[in-house]
Image (tube, rainbow, N blue to C red):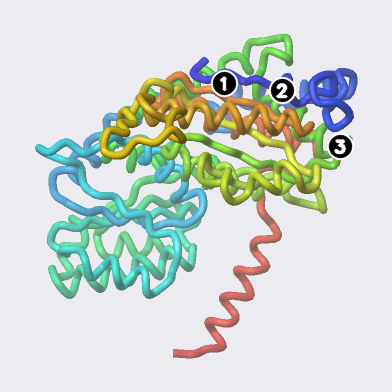
C-alpha cells in the first residue's frame, strides 16, 4: 500500500470521551458491509465504470498521442473546466518536479473561474501561436466553461484564423447533442468522449485527469496502479477492518454521529498536495452534503496553517475530525548553515536540513492535537509520486461512497446545485445583450 492509515488516535482509549468507543466503531464498520458488497457487484457487472479504471491500460496509448502533440506544438496550455473537470488534473500535475532545461513540458494553466481580470491578464501574457486549449465539460453545457472557451476561440481565431482552431483546441465531453458537441463539430475541433457514467468529481482516473498529467510528463499507468492497490483489498477482503476506505468512512460518520464532529479537516504537510486537498473538499462536500446530512470539509496546509488555524483547532470547539497527511521529509533539503550570523537561539536549527524542520512540525501538530483530545488519523506517504496520488484519490473516492451509504444519501448526484445554475441563467437572460 502506498500509504499507511493510522487511526488509533480516533478512539476513546487514546483520547478519552471525545473519541469513538470500540463498540461504536465496530457497529458502524459492520454497517459498511452492504456498501462494500454493492461496490463489488458494480465492479463485476461494470455498472460503475470508475471501478474498472484502475485496471485499464488500453485507453492510454491514444491519450499519449494527443499529449505528445500538445507537448510538441505548444508552450502554454489552457485547461478550461470547473470543479471535477479541473481539480483532479490540477492535483496530479502538481506532482511534476522542476522542468528540465532542455525540452521542458508546456506550462499548464487551469482556468476554473470566470473572473475577467484574471482571464485577461493570462491571455495578455501568452502567444496565441504557441497556445493550446483543452475544454472539459461532462454535460457540454457548463456556462462557465463555455464562456471561457468562446473567449479563447475568439482570441485564437483573431490571431491565427478560424482554421487554426481545429489544431489548437480539444474538447472532452460526453457523447450526445450538447452545445459543446455541436460547437466542436461545427468548428472541426476534436472531441474526446467523457464517460457519461463517471461524474466529474470521480473522473480523475479517466482522460479528464490523465490527459493533463501525461502532457506534464507523469506516468498515468502508475496513477492507476496506485488506485488499484486500494481498490483490490475492497474487492477481495472479507474483514472490513482490512479495507482502509471502509475504516475511514466508519470513523468519519461515527465521530459526527456520536461526538458532534461536524467538520472534517484535511491537513497535508506536503505542498504538492495543496490542490489534492481542494479536490477532496469538493468530492466530500458535493457527494454527502444532502438532506440535512453530511460534514463540512476544510483544508489546512502545514506548516502554513499552524500559524493561522491551529489555535482554533487546539483550543476551539471540539467539532472536528483531523486527517494529517505526512511525507518523509527528514534529511532532505538544504542545510541550515548559520555561518553568516550565528546566535545561541538558533541551536535547534543549526546544521539540520529544511526537511528536518518540516518533519518535526508535522509530528508535533499531530501529537499536540491528540494531547488536546482531538480525533486524529495520520496518513503517511513514503514517497510522493503518481502511485501514491492514485492511491490517495481512490481511497477518498471509496471512503466518500461508503460514507454516503452510512448516511443514506446518493453520492453521485448534486440536486441542490442545479437551483443556483437555473437562477444564474435567469439573471443572464434578464441582463440582455
Kindly state the secondary structure of the residue where label 2 is placed. Answer: helix
Which of pointers 3 and 1 lies earlier in the amino acid sequence?
A: 1
Q: Residues within 10 Å of mark 3 (few under 14, many from 20)?
A: some
Q: Are marks 2 and 3 in contact (CB under 8 Å)?
A: no
Q: Where residue 335 sits in the image (x, y, percent)?
A: 31, 28
* Residue drawn at 66 percent across, 17 percent down: 243
Q: Where residue 247 sits in the image (x, y, percent)?
A: 72, 23
Residue 231: give its label. Answer: 1
For the C terminus, the quadrant is bottom left
Kindly state the secondary structure of the residue where label 1 is placed. Answer: helix
* Residue drawn at 58 percent across, 43 percent down: 306
Which of pointers 2 and 3 lies earlier in the amino acid sequence?
A: 2
Q: CA distance from mark 2 to mark 3?
A: 17 Å
Q: Nearer the viewer, mark 2 or mark 1?
A: 2
Residue 87: give its label. Answer: none
Q: Nearer the viewer, mark 3 or mark 1?
A: 3
Query: Residue 236 occupies which quadrant of the picture?
Result: top right
Q: Where residue 341 sits in the image (x, y, percent)?
A: 31, 39
Q: CA distance from mark 3 to mark 1?
A: 29 Å
Q: CA distance from mark 2 to mark 1?
A: 14 Å
Query: Which residue position is annotated with label 3?
Result: 259
Is residue 388 among what the camera can see? yes
Q: Where residue 65 sits in the image (x, y, percent)?
A: 22, 37
Query: Residue 259 occupies which quadrant of the picture?
Result: top right
Query: Which residue position is annotated with label 2?
Result: 247
Amino acid at each position: 500500500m502506498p500509504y499507511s492509515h493510522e487511526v488509533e488516535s480516533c478512539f476513546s482509549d487514546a483520547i478519552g470521551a471525545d473519541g469513538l468507543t470500540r463498540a461504536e466503531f465496530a457497529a458502524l464498520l459492520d454497517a459498511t458491509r452492504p456498501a462494500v458488497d454493492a461496490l463489488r457487484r458494480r465492479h463485476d457487472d461494470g455498472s460503475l465504470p470508475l471501478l474498472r479504471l484502475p485496471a485499464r491500460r488500453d485507453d492510454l496509448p491514444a491519450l499519449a498521442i494527443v499529449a505528445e502533440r500538445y507537448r510538441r506544438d505548444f508552450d502554454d496550455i489552457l485547461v478550461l473546466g470547473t470543479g471535477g473537470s479541473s481539480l483532479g488534473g490540477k492535483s496530479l500535475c502538481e506532482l511534476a518536479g522542476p522542468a528540465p532545461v532542455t525540452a521542458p513540458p508546456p506550462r499548464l494553466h487551469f482556468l476554473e473561474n470566470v473572473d475577467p481580470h484574471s482571464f485577461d491578464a493570462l491571455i495578455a501574457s501568452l502567444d496565441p501561436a504557441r497556445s493550446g486549449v483543452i475544454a472539459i465539460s461532462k454535460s457540454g453545457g457548463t456556462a462557465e466553461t463555455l464562456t471561457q472557451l468562446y473567449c479563447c476561440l475568439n482570441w485564437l481565431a483573431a490571431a491565427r484564423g478560424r482554421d487554426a482552431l481545429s489544431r489548437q483546441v480539444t474538447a472532452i465531453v460526453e457523447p450526445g447533442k450538447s452545445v459543446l458537441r455541436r460547437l466542436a463539430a461545427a468548428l472541426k475541433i476534436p472531441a474526446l468522449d467523457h464517460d457519461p457514467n463517471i461524474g466529474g468529481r470521480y473522473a480523475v482516473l479517466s482522460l479528464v485527469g490523465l490527459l493533463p498529467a501525461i502532457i506534464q510528463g507523469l506516468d498515468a499507468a502508475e496513477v492507476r496502479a496506485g488506485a488499484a492497490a486500494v481498490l483490490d483489498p475492497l474487492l477481495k477482503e472479507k474483514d472490513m477492518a482490512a479495507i482502509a476506505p471502509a475504516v475511514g468512512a466508519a470513523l468519519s460518520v461515527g465521530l459526527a454521529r456520536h461526538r458532534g464532529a461536524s467538520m472534517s479537516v484535511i491537513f497535508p504537510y506536503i505542498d504538492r498536495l495543496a490542490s489534492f486537498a481542494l479536490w477532496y473538499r469538493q468530492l466530500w462536500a458535493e457527494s454527502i452534503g444532502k438532506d440535512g446530512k453530511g460534514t463540512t470539509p476544510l483544508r489546512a496546509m502545514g506548516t502554513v496553517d499552524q500559524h493561522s488555524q491551529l489555535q482554533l483547532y487546539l483550543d476551539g470547539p471540539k467539532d472536528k475530525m483531523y486527517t494529517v497527511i505526512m511525507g518523509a521529509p527528514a534529511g532532505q533539503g538544504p542545510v541550515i548553515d548559520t555561518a553568516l550570523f550565528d546566535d545561541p537561539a538558533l541551536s535547534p536549527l543549526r546544521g539540520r536540513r529544511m526537511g528536518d524542520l518540516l518533519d518535526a512540525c508535522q509530528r508535533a501538530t499531530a501529537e499536540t492535537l491528540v494531547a488536546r483530545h482531538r480525533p486524529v488519523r495520520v496518513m503517511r506517504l513514503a514517497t510522493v509520486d503518481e502511485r501514491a496520488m492514485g492511491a490517495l484519490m481512490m481511497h477518498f473516492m471509496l471512503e466518500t461512497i461508503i460514507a454516503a451509504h452510512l448516511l443514506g444519501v446518493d453520492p453521485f448526484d448534486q440536486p441542490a446545485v442545479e437551483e443556483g445554475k437555473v437562477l444564474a441563467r435567469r439573471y443572464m437572460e434578464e441582463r440582455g445583450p
